[in-house]
Amino acid sequence: MDPWNSAQEDVVPCTLCKTSMAPMYCEVCHTHLCKDCVEKHLSDSSKVHNVVSLKQYLTTLNYPKCRKHPIKQCEVHCEQCNIPICAQCISGEHFGHKPVDIFQNFDIKKEVVQKELEELEKSIYPKYKEIASKIPVQKADLSKNSQKLTTAIDKQGEVWHREIDTIITNLKSNVKKMESKHLVILNKQEDEITHTISKITQTITELKRLLNSKDVCLVFEYKSRIAEFRKMPPKLKVSLPYFRPQEIHTDQLIERFGSLSALSFTTEKQDYSMPPLGAESSLPDRLLMDVPRVITAIGIGYVDLFGVSCLNDTKVWTCGSDNMMKLYNLQGERVESIQTKSGNNPTDIAVTRSGDLVYTDRDDRTVNIVKNTQIQTVIRLQGWRPYGVCSTSSETTSLWLSVTEVK
């Protein structure tokens, strides 16, 4: 065991009690455990745990060799360059960069893999299966409707006898053409969904393999496809044709016999909502970083910065000492600017689960939401001034406010 690994073992706290040092490690849950908490952890029968000494676990990891110094073992991960490096690199070309414990980074990466596996297995995969299961029903309805149309046309044809046989044949042909056209679309959608399900199955297998792997490089090479699978296939809405019989007028046979309505297709986007954080889907507890990691530096142009709220992983809303709220990407480019409804400086901002911007206006005593660039006042306080605001991550949008009484 390297001295670095031995030192690391002495400073890792227990994930459960967070007070004692953790000489034990659960390879299944990726959880650090002190001796007192091992029994408590093993009492959770929802998983088959495998608790080993942290020292033993560290010796089984396949630590990568340094690219710059092949005889050296990588002990840390350079966050700025996103590569594993050895101790010699820290004082060399990576001097001044932010090194992170490679074992800690390995644990975090495993947690991400575990979370994506759970989301695929428990949410995305069942959703695709549910969508796929509805297509045979649509096919059955299509067949029933086509049969219903054919029967109605036959009944009308018996009354009209031979002189309208040509019309009957043409209408039946139209039914078959529309059925074939509809069936082609349904088959195409079924094939696409089946193909996606196959890719999800392969991804699940790969993620499981990564979870069981102790190859650090292999885990770091994993590229997430979760965003691709979160995009649900469009829902096909079909207005099935129907037959309208008419009164018989010999001089208007063709016009009065009846006609089929047009076959139309529309698609409806199916939104995907990430599962709420709970006991089963949340990441295992882990310590916060001792030193914050700088992702990017953005010149925002405010004298004073009042609030920051992430829209997603690549864009962030800001507000400060003017009446403009500004959206930036990680390259420091301003993507959008919105002026407050009253012209006052916003006091604080937040982003809802659905991506709408919320801001408080202390002077106007209002809480406002921005939907499609349109500002709506949702709360107007009497006798109080709103200050801080935050949005919950629950299925329904909820806001928490801090207010002060007007003297």
Image (cartoon, rainbow, N blue to C red):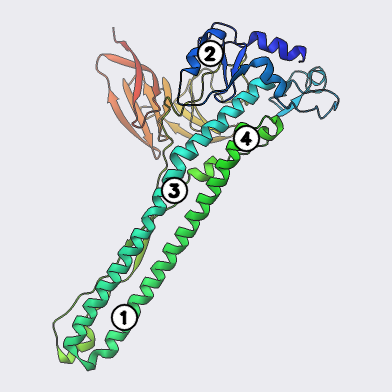
**In the image, which disc is placed on residue 210?**
4
- Give the mark, 2 or 1, whose residue is nearer the N terminus: 2
Which residue is depicted at the point 48% across and 13% down? 40
Kind of element beneath mark 4: helix
Provide the residue designation for mark 2: 38
Q: Amino acid at mark 4?
A: Leu
Tell me the mark number nearer the camera, choosing from 2 and 4: 2
Residues tagged 2 and 4 counted as in contact (Cβ below 8 A): no
Density class for disc 3 (Cα within 10 Å; few <14, some 14-19, many ≥20) is some
Res 255 → quadrant: bottom left
Q: Residue at x 72, y 15 (%)?
A: 5
Residue type at tag 2: Val
Marks 2 and 3 close (CB-CB < 8 Å) = no
Give the residue pinned by disc 1. 172
Q: Which residue is mark 3?
A: 128
The alpha-carbon separation of the residues under discs 1 and 3 comes to 35 Å
- Which SS class for mark 3? helix
Label 1 SS = helix
